[in-house]
Image (cartoon, helix red, strand yellow):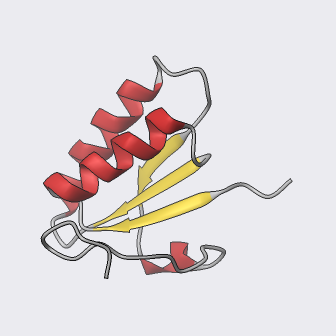
Amino acid sequence: MNKRKVVIIGAGHVGSHCAMALAFGGVCEEIVLLDTDLEKARANAMDVADACLFTPGSCTVHVGNYCYFRGSAPQARPNAAGHAG
């Protein structure tokens, strides 16, 4: 069985909220956060992973790099205002 993986570029407010919504919605089994600020990405990944403990599904959340795009299908990407572009 293939795992559904989502890679989010940008671990700021929008990226971390997207990760939280995906995790709570049971949309995927793996979320990878990418950001130029590695510490921010780690902190937000830990916050989302901690929140996943209280959801019925199992979703892993971690920080990665661009090699994690392998196996991810491109989808709509929100711009800075949060609108799909």
Residue 51 point in image, percent of width and height: 37, 26
Q: Is residue 56 above or below residue 61?
A: above
Q: Is residue 49 above or below residue 79?
A: above
Residue drawn at x 22%, y 77% is: 79
Residue in the foreground of this view, choosing between 11 and 42: 11
Locate residue 30 relative to residue 76 in the image: left or right.
Answer: right
Q: How many marks?
A: 0
Locate residue 51 relative to residue 28 in the image: left or right.
Answer: left
* Quadrant in the picture for residue 8: bottom left
Residue 15 point in image, percent of width and height: 26, 58
Locate residue 1 relative to residue 81 in the image: left or right.
Answer: right
* Quadrant in the picture for residue 46: top left
Residue drawn at x 15%, y 65% is: 37
Residue 1 point in image, percent of width and height: 86, 53
Residue in the foreground of this view, choosing between 28 and 11: 28
Residue drawn at x 38%, y 42% is: 21
Looking at the rendering, in which quadrant would you find the C terminus? bottom left
Locate residue 3 relative to residue 85 in the image: left or right.
Answer: right
Residue drawn at x 41%, y 73% is: 65
Residue sitting farthest toward the top: 54
